Amino acid sequence: MTQQRLKATARAPAERGIDMPSAQRTPTVRGKAVPRKTPTSGPAASTYRARLNRRLYGALAAVLTAILTTFFSLYTEIGQGVDTLMMESVMARATAVARVENIVTGVVSPAAMVVVSVAVTLVALARRRPTLAGRAVSVVLVANLLTQLLKVLLHRPDLGLTTGLANSLPSGHVTVAASVSLALIMVAPAWMRAPAAWLGWMWTALMGITVVAQAWHRPADVLVALLLTGACALILAPIESRDRHVPGIHRAMGIAVAIAVVLALVCSLIALWGIDMRAVASPGSGFGFSDYLDSVPTRERLFAVAGISWIIAISGLIMHEVDHLSGRVSD
């Protein structure tokens, strides 16, 4: 009787975590999973190391890129100029966003964060994963506290290129949207993970575009918020391996992100070709470049597409990478 029970237990598939060979899979006793140790050898260990390296390198790359973006956009003339050119161009072209901007930004509030945190916790507890609830809520708390701290510490000097305005980097609205979306991706069951990533991407990107179109933030404010929030999620998200219900959804997101990155790079390079920031700047004219942009509508459109594409690309990238931790490497 005991031998039959052991054989049946050995055949039981792991409910979550790294997809281990049958000889190493975690047994279950009366329907309850026994805690599994990190694999130390074999295919499972190789998979785990690959996931761990991707997580760590991804988080490190996000932090370093956020630091470089902050320095470039706040403390260099060309950085302030590019940031302002993109913001003013998005403001002039993003008329479609005006129809939903109040709805998009209105849902971001401390009360909304509490409601979402409770919802995230309940979903994780319903899945019998209290530790995951703690991880997901920590992403929201750490990312938003870090954003508010940086707002106080960072200073945007007046370099004489743009209309003097105080620092607004990183964006609090975008941090809330991104952290909530990533937390929901982390706790979502397997069949909802990829759709949750797509929905989170759309909402976060729309939030970023909206705050730029309203002149609440410059594009760099949005990008730094996304990168820091993504780093927090990559550090705290669990490394899992499950069968995806529709693997193509995850692949499609990766392709869409790659297209957005290429579009952002191409439009940025073409729009910036041959520009002398000092020559075209006119502080006091809007935010510093309104007169120039009015005289070059084609370049204005390129700057607008570039700014929007960067927001779409980076928001999609962080959603894709956190979602990637939940599925098989081969998907």
Image: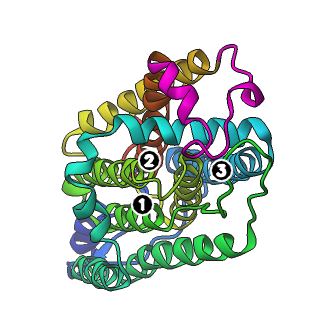
Instruction: Give x and y (percent) for residue 96.
Output: 24, 41
Q: Give amino acid for label 3.
A: Thr
How far is the residue under mark 2 from the one under mark 1? 8 Å
* Residue 329 visible in the picture: no
* Callout 3 secondary element: loop
Q: Are marks 2 and 1 in contact (CB under 8 Å)?
A: yes
Residue 261 in picture, x, y percent from top left: 49, 29
Look at the picture and state if 102 lies above or below 55.
below
Q: Which mark is residue 69?
A: none
| Res. 223 in view | yes
Of labels 1 and 3, earlier in sequence is 3
Q: Which residues are magenta?
A: 273-297
Instruction: Report, in whole angstroms, how far the alpha carbon at label 3 lies from the one at label 2.
Output: 28 Å
Q: Judge left or right: residue 311 versus residue 69.
A: left
Amino acid marked by disc 1: Ala
Q: Is residue 18 above or below residue 267?
A: below
Type of the residue with mark 2: Ser
First in sequence: mark 2 vs mark 1:
1
> Do tag 1 and tag 3 residues touch (Cβ < 8 Å)?
no
Which label is found at residue 163? 3
Label 1 vs label 3, nearer the camera: 3
Q: Observer-nearest residue: 112 or 23?
A: 112
Say which residue appears at 38% left-offset and 63% top-offset: 177
**Is residue 285 toward the left or the right of residue 258 in the image?**
right
| Residue 232 located within the stretch drawn in magenta | no
Q: Which residue is denoted by mark 1 in the rendering?
A: 178
Q: Please provide percent x and percent y for residue 81.
A: 68, 37
- The reply to whether the magenta stretch includes residue 284 is yes
Residue beneath disc 2: 315
